[in-house]
Amino acid sequence: MNTEELVEIVLPGKVEPEGLEIRHGAVPVPGTGQVVIRMEATGVSFAEQQMRRGRYYDQPAFPFVPGYDLVGTIVTTGDGVEPGLAGMRVAALVKVGGWASHVLVDAADVVPVPEGVGAAEAETVVVNGITAWQMLHRKAHVKAGQTVLVHGANGGVGTVLVQLALAAGAKVIGTASARHHAALRAKGVIPVDYRTEDVPRRVRELAPGGVDAVFDHVGGRSAVDSWHLLAPGGTLVSYGSASTRDDEGSGSWPVLKLLGRVWLWNTLPNRRRAYFFNVWAGRAYAKNRFRTRLSADLTQVFAALKRGDITAQIAAELPLARIADAMRLAESGTVAGKVVLNP
C-alpha cells in the first residue's frame, strides 16, 4: 500500500518568505499521457522571487505552488505512457508547481537525466541551462573568437552562460560584485564590478570596437547601455528586469517597456539586433516543436555538464521545509549559483 504523502509549498499572496505555507495532501494520480515525478531537487530562481512580490509578468492567480523546474524519479505513469518510464530520473520545466514532493507532468515534457549526473547538479542547469543555451546558440549564435558581455555573471543563468560561451571559444566579460571576481577569473572571465565601476566605459576599454553579444537580465537603463555597447552585427538578448524587482505597481510594465525598446531598436537602419528572450515562446501555438527543441537543447546542456564544459554551481542545498531560509538566501545577492531545494 502506498503511504506516501504530498508535501508542497504554497504562495498564498504577496508575502515575506516566512509567509510561504506548507500544505499536505494526497499524492496526485496521473491521467492519460501523464507521469508523477517524485521530486529529488528543485530550486529558487529569479522568477519565484518576482512571483512572491506579484511581479512575474504572467504568473497565475494566488494561491499557487511555485517552482519553475525540478529533477526527480518517475514513480507512476498514466494511460498511454510507456510503463518502462517508471524508475527513470528525469528533469522537467514546469513554470509553477515544482516546489512539491510529487509533481504531475505530461510525459512529453520530461527529459532524461544522464547516468552519473546527480539530482542537485542537474537541477542547477534545467531552467538556467535551457535559458543560457538558447540565448547563446539560438538567438545570438555566438562563435569562436567573438566577445560577449554577460551581466550577472555569478548568478544562476549567468554562471551557466559564461561557461557555455567560453566552451564555444568566445572571450567573456562578466559583471558581478567584487566578491565574485576571483571565481570568475578562475573560469577565464574578465570581471567588471557593477557596483564601483562605470560599466559601459570599462567594457569599451576592453572591447573598443564593441561586443558581439550582450546578455542582459537587468533591464531599465542597463538594457539601453547594453544596446549601445554592441559592435556592428552584434546582438542584444534581454531576458529580464531585475532592476525593478522591488518596485511597486504592475509587474508587466517593465517587460512591456523592454518589448517596446526591442521593437524600436530593430526598426533602426543598422546591422544590430535585439531580442527579448522568453523560454516559453512558441509553446502556445507550436507545442510539439517547443517540446522537441527543449528536449534537444536540455540534452545538449546535460552533455556539456557531464563532459565538464560546465560545472554545477550549487549555492546551497536546503530541505523544502526551510523554504523561507532558501528564499532569503537566494534573494540576498551574496551567493553564486543556484539555491537547491530537496524533499
Image: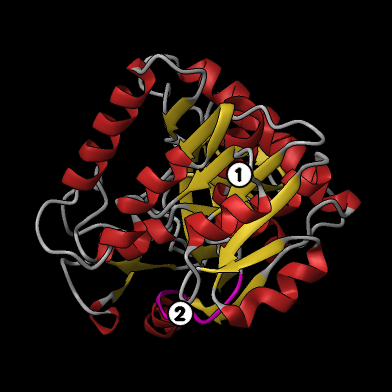
Where 283 falls versus 334 (above or below)? above
* SS at badge 2: helix
Disc on the earlier residue, 1 or 2: 1
The residue that appears at 55% across and 25% down in the rendered structure is 291
Specify whether residue 229 is painted magenta. no
Specify whether residue 333 is painted magenta. yes
Instruction: Pick the quarter of the image with the C terminus.
Output: bottom right
Nearer-the-camera pick, 300 or 40: 300
Q: Mark 1 points at which residue?
A: 132
The residue that appears at 66% across and 66% down in the rendered structure is 191
Q: Which segment did they paint magenta?
A: 330-336
Q: Crowdedness of circle 2 by 10 Å Cα count: few (<14), some, many (20+)? A: many
| Left or right, 147 with reference to 106 | right
Name the disc covering residue 78, or none.
none
Amino acid on which disc 2 is placed: Ala
The colour mode here is secondary structure
In x, y percent, where is residue 242? 35, 59
Where 182 falls versus 174 (above or below)? below
Name the disc covering residue 326, or none.
2
Residue located farthest toward the right when viewing the structure as drawn: 307
Would you say the magenta stretch is mainly helix, strand or loop?
loop
Amino acid on which disc 1 is placed: Ala
The residue that appears at 34% across and 65% down in the rendered structure is 49
